[in-house]
Amino acid sequence: MRLSEAAAVGRIARRTARRNWKRTALIIGLIAVPVAAAQITAGLAAASRIAPEEYVTQQLGASDLLVQMYAPTTESATWVEEQLADVAPDAEMLRYRNAYAAIPDATSYVELTDLEVTAPLAQGKYGLIAGRLPNASGEIAVSDGVAELGDLAIGDRVQLDVEGVASATSDLPESFTIVGTIRDALYRHRRAAVISSSDMDAVYAASGVDTHEFGARDAAWLVATRDPDGLSSALYERWERARAGFRPGPAVTPKPAALSVIDDDLYASLSVEMIEELVAYAATLPPDDGMTAQLVYDEAFRLLDGFPLVFPEMVANSAASLASYESATDRALQAPAVLGTIVAALLLAEVALVAGAAYATGIRRRLREVGLLDVNGATGQHLRWIVVGEGLIAGVIGAGIGTTAAVLAMILGRTQVQGFVDRHIEGIPLGVPELIAPAIVGIVAATVAAWIPARAAARVPTTSALEGRMPLASPRRWVVPLGGAMTGLGAFLVIVARTAFGPSGAYQAGLGVALMIGGFALVAGPMVAWMGHRADRLPAITRLVVRDAARQRTRAATAIAATMVVLIAPVVAGIAIATSQATDAIHGLPEDPRHVLVAGGSGYSMPPTTDVQPEDIAAVAELLPNARHVEFTAYDDWTDARFAGTEDEVRGPGIGPGEMSVAIGTRELLDLLGVSAATDALENGKAVVLGTQDRDVSIIVGDDEIDGVEVPASVMRYGGFPRVLLNEDLAATLDLGRSSTVVLFVNDEPLTEREALTVGEITAARPVWPEGFTRTQIGALVFGGTLLAVIIILALVTALAATESDHDLRTMVAVGAAPKIRRRFLGTQTVYFTFVAGVLATPLGLLLVEVSTSNDWVDVGPFGSMNAGTLVIPWAMLVLVIVGMPLVVGGLTALAVRSAPTVPPRRIG
Amino acid sequence: MGIREGLLTLLATGPAHGYQLKVDFETATGEAWQLNIGQVYTTLQRLERDGLVDLVENDDEGRVIYAITAAGREVLTSWMETPVQRTAANRDDVSMKLLLAMASEVVDPFTVVATQRNATMTAIQDYTRLKAATDPSDLAWLLHIDRLILRSEADLRWLDRVEERLDTVAIGDRNRVRGRHEHDTSIPVPTGEEH
Amino acid sequence: MDIVLSMRRIGRTHGKGAQRVDALVDIDLDVAAGEWVAVTGRSGSGKTTLLNVAGGLDEPTTGTVQVEGAHLDDLSKTDLARLRRQSIGYVFQDFNLLPTLTAAENVALPLELDGVGLAAARRQAIESLAQVSLDRMADRYPDQLSGGEQQRVAIARGLVGPRSLLLADEPTGALDDLTSETILKLIRARCDAGAAAVMVTHEPSFAAWADRVVRLRDGRIESITEGSSVPPSLAELAI
């Protein structure tokens, strides 16, 4: 196309876009929103992604090799220094130590280090934000993450709590003065603090190695060397030979055959008594059971109270090994990108469909202009570009507005973005690719939306166009096979995308979803036309609606496809809800976010080993003044309570067979749990099982079988929470082992996140972590949102369609129909569109869920997680979507629209 | 237009005697034009004198039968094919000619319409050219020409209407002289006094 | 004389079998440069079909059409479009102009689509508008023009630049008599200046402005009248 042709064509497109500014504004808005959403998603994904080089710098600073000795002893630490001096005598090195502590009222853990942050070798690991580094005992520099949590500033004084050993009882200074704030190279929320070397000595002394989990403290060396990988290999080689010398031997040698499944490190942690008990336990297990190894392992852990001994372990990482490790873990970070791409693809497909309907209607009204252009020698190419140009203009402006909005949002919401991605962000976290790709996709969507009506208009014979008539072409023969092929290819891409991680997977999935929708949209046209041929026996209005849709196939098909896309949401949500409800029936009701359980001990061990501490009760009571609480006796053994006559298949309430802990039930406890109806049963000597439904059950506790009643109740997903309640008399007749007192708090309202956090800091108390929304709320949101979206789409399409059908309707009024025929017509039309859309959306939604869950468990927010094997299809709800939704939308439309005007039809110029 | 051409037209469909010609004439013109039998005989005698008709014979009842001659046909055809002149714009003449054409088979009435239309169209074209050449300030002339054009246009409209009506009535249903002559044997027998 | 439009033995049928309709039968028509032909006839007589076939909007079933020597049936769609840009101007009863373009832009449209530079196209458009005395209104939009002015713009567009054949379908159908006369005088003037025109109309008094009046009946040419070779004298017409 030559310049002046393009100018002429562009001028008409531009002026038409301006003249029909309502339509243009609608499409601009439709494009801007998903473009901005996609750009922000991409920006967040890019900002949260950690490049291997960045990770390497965070770990190595300016050095070449990081050697760490976890759970070091003095001997093992000295060993490392000797080896380094031996293998690489010229290497420069920087030694430092790390340990964990808590800062009361700020954070339950903080990584302490005595690294000389400003040393040349440490460059890049931390940055100093304000103040200075500690250079004397009693001084501390905390990371911004810690400062934020505890609302701390330079000059504040804090205490350090090293694994329950208060500062006061050791050589640790009683309190530390904050002299500076530091930042981690990568993470904004990293809880780190720098203390002086002398204070680190005290921390080391206070944290006994034997009782701590792996990595509670370590010694580290940053080494500058020419051949880090050679040095690393040499160190590993020597460590393999030397490591046995740094740990105690097992208590009993040789290892009994029954315990062969336990690895040597774990075995070495066991005392003689533990080994004897374990051997006895193993003897009770049936032979040839696939579970045997796991049970023995679990029992060993239980005997160790969850913490086996930790022995010194050396790790030596060079840039190369760190980078390969980081790129392997990189894929997890692609998840938001995948989801974002799919959502953006859906949105843009939706936009293309709605905009397509708008353009299809517009072009029908402007056929006369097409005819005039035709007789003035415009070629098909000119005609197409005039309409496509209009879409292009709307797309470019929409993408521009979207991009501006995204950039502004990222600038204005920088603090939130930094918090969300847990990174320090310099400048705007939106690179050119993150901005360009969604913008281009948005422009393409608008252009594609205009392309199909443009093509159709360019094909109309000139003489028909001049008369404003668009002859009804029969559906092209390739449409249905092509639609089928597109759907198939789309489904294939989605399946393949599940197994291909990384960006390509995201694009495959996005493309696949778009293809499937496109395929269904293609099929919708012929389907509507086919139904038009079979409308003879329908009542007048319905017949008119079906025939009208058949005549204006493109608009009807795009409206149906747009509605279909939206209706996929309730189908998917319905399946998720039904599935999670079915899962509840097996795994127990959802947790009650008002519950707080306070038990003795550290709170890590389950069940609790000691009675609850009064100060812990007081602390929770102070925090939750409106909460009621009941003290009760729980048995510390994992009592082997299970349903009589069941095995794995029907688990009953609880986590699994034999995981229903036993407690003494009282009237107060039952009241608090909201199951007072079971009080009689309890007092009559029956067991009360907190489960999922009302039924009589038989419970096996130890060797005894007890009659019981099961009642639905929310329980915590935590072994210490009682599931089987007995009265005292009954409990006395059973051999239930040791007991301890625990307290259940039930707050009047669900705990806020902050309250839950604070409760969590009290080590003996366990809150239920709050979720943003409950399942029911999400379900209601999805259905409400869908209804709203369907109404908006169909209102748009109806408004557009009315400009065409009003002519027919006026004629009908002129021949004697009541003016309210318009309401009935438009209402029936939306019923029809929504119904067909529902019929198409149901299999599409089922397929999407089935496909996306076939390889994996998929996390679906508050609904838990789904897997193809666990899916439950809620047929009743799907019928509701197919039948109920159309009736509601149609009824609302009929109420909202005006009756037909009685002015006789005029020729549309 | 006279009785002369009318009688010639009727004789062109076949020989006839005087009284029959009077009845046929009145039938063809929708009895809108009453003829005196004396007028008929006088005209026939003049036609015989000019050699346009021949006295054929006396029939069974002694009545004189006339027939058209070749010369008579020639005169008739040329008359039929000549449009009525605009200067003497006499619609009655045009109507008469059309009615007679419909009643006979001498000339297709469509031909008459077409001929008359061409003449009228030509006239309108002539007027329009005069108008185009007229000084726009010469109102008197322009108004006169407009009147002539509009009147001619009305003529054309009427011709169109004639054509449409002819289209809607089948040929067999028109008032045709021959048809009545052949099938209706109950023509009233003229009495002797009428001779 | 140069023959601009030549139609030979044109036939056009719609439908098949019992539904077959002969829209045009055996039409022969030549229109020379400077000549204006009016086509009349009752509705359904094939007037508009004749015009559509002449402009290449409709294809004849039989026969050939030549415009400026080019056989239309030899031309591809693209070539036909170019022919319409360069040679043929259409004027319809109403709604002739694109509402989004000014008068000058409407007139310049075929030139611009043909690749003529913007400035040159505008200059030629203004020239053409000047010939219909509308150059003062060049930058108005169609909805700021009266019906007669819109038709004049359409005529200006129909004969802009190299265009030499004006095809008009009831160009005065939506106008009153005196405004119609202005339009007809304009076409007359453009034809006297060398353009060729074919105009479909059902009004004899409008058709009379043409050099020849072709009357169609059932798709056939019934008559062609050209006025008297010796025009009547004024005296003859005196009251």
Image (tube, rainbow, N blue to C red):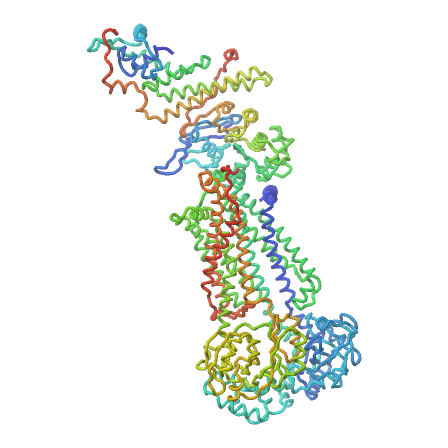
Q: Position of residue A173 (x, y in %)?
A: 77, 82
Q: Is residue A356 left or right of residue A473?
A: right
Residue A21 vertical placement versus A706 (above, below): above
Residue A549 vertical placement versus C96 (above, below): below
Along the viewing direction, whichever of A148 and A11 lies nearer the viewer: A148
User: Which quadrant: the N terminus of chain A?
Assistant: top right
Q: Is residue A256 left or right of residue B52?
A: right
Residue furthest out toward the left: B60
Q: Is residue A5 left or right of residue A126?
A: left
Q: Is residue A64 left or right of residue A250?
A: right
Q: Position of residue A518 (x, y in %)?
A: 50, 56
Res. C188 in view = no
Q: Position of residue A791 (x, y in %)?
A: 53, 53
The residue lying at 62 percent from left, 28 percent from top is: C133
Along the viewing direction, whichever of A754 and B79 lies nearer the viewer: A754
Q: Position of residue A413 (x, y in %)?
A: 68, 61
Res. A864 in view = yes
Residue A493 vertical placement versus C44 (above, below): below
Along the viewing direction, whichever of A599 and A189 lies nearer the viewer: A599
The image shows a total of numbered marks equal to 0
- Quarter of the image holding residue C138? top right
Residue A48 vertical placement versus C159 (above, below): below
